[in-house]
Image (tube, rainbow, N blue to C red):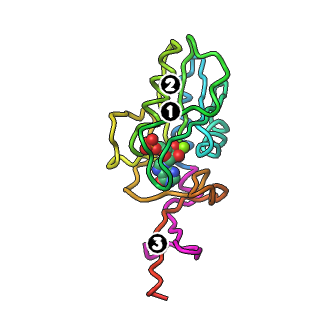
């Protein structure tokens, strides 16, 4: 990426992947589609904390339909950059799901375990429908079958930060999206 501007940190670079403007264009398109598809429905957005908080807040500002909003927080075991299949709910959905049209709002889908777990759990509560909106999709890393109904943009197998998404709780505040690469200290 010749035109990206890496931020120097301790042991890794942040390389610009999507500018705030590029993200806004993707989010607006998703909001338009959702507004059309759910015009006559009772939409309940379920945002997965923490990573999707910024995406959710931008998305709802562009919606042209009334919605209800709830949050869920999931913990997956396996530290560092990889998710394991074991997932636990640390903050559950509070609003009633039964009969509602549920749209899960997620920052990034990788193996698919997180969304598979949450979707199956929501289905147990008898919603009218349950679909998935994910800003970023690392298709190449999928380990379980998981279809994204409202996909933002596909990304390669890189580690993403910014726009709500973290690396050990850092970088969530950044308005752009970056991918992380290690610094080779021999290069200076
Ligand atoms: P999955 O269960 O493997 O699909 O992982 C999805 C979750 O892992 C997302 O909700 C993110 O929190 C996290 N995740 C996956 N890829 C990345 C990444 O590149 N950067 C930061 N978090 C990620
Ligand atoms: Mg997440």
Of badges 3 and 2, the one in the foreground is 3
Report the Cα–Cα distance between label 3 and label 2: 42 Å
Q: Is residue 140 left or right of residue 167?
A: left
- Marking on residue 33: 1
**Looking at the image, which is closer to me, 100 or 124?**
124
Relative height, residue 156 to residue 108 (above, below): below
Image location (x, y in percent) of residue 2: 44, 76
Tell me if I can see residue 107 in this picture.
no
Pointer 3: what residue?
A: 182
Q: Quadrant of residue 44?
A: top right
Image location (x, y in percent) of residue 176: 59, 59
- Marking on residue 37: 2
Quick one: label 3 or label 2, which is nearer the N terminus? 2
Q: Name the secondary structure under disc 2.
A: helix
Does the CB distance between marks 3 and 2 fall below 8 Å?
no
Highlighted magenta segment, given as a residue range: 1-24
- Residue under the image location 49 percent in, 15 percent down: 124
Report the Cα–Cα distance between label 1 and label 3: 37 Å
Image location (x, y in percent) of residue 125: 53, 14
Of badges 1 and 3, the one in the foreground is 3
Report the Cα–Cα distance between label 1 and label 2: 6 Å
Image location (x, y in percent) of residue 144: 34, 36
**Looking at the image, which is closer to me, 178 or 22?**
178
Quick one: label 1 or label 3, which is nearer the N terminus? 1
Q: Is mark 2 within 8 Å of ligand 1?
A: no
């Amino acid at each position: 990426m010749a035109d990206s501007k890496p931020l120097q940190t301790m042991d890794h670079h942040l390389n610009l992947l999507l500018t705030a403007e590029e993200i806004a264009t993707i989010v607006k398109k998703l909001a338009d589609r959702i507004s059309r598809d759910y015009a006559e429905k009772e939409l309940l957005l379920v945002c997965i904390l923490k990573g999707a908080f910024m995406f959710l807040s931008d998305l709802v500002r562009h919606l042209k339909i009334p919605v209800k909003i709830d949050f869920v927080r999931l913990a997956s075991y396996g530290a560092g950059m990889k998710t394991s299949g074991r997932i636990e709910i640390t903050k559950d959905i509070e609003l009633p799901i039964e009969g509602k049209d549920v749209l899960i709002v997620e920052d990034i889908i990788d193996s698919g375990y997180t969304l598979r777990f949450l979707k199956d759990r929501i289905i147990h509560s008898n919603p009218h429908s349950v679909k998935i909106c994910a800003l970023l999709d690392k298709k190449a890393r999928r380990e379980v079958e998981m279809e994204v109904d409202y996909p933002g943009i596909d990304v390669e197998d890189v580690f993403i930060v910014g726009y709500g998404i973290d690396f050990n709780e850092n970088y969530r505040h950044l308005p752009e999206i970056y991918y992380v690469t290690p610094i080779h200290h021999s290069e200076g």
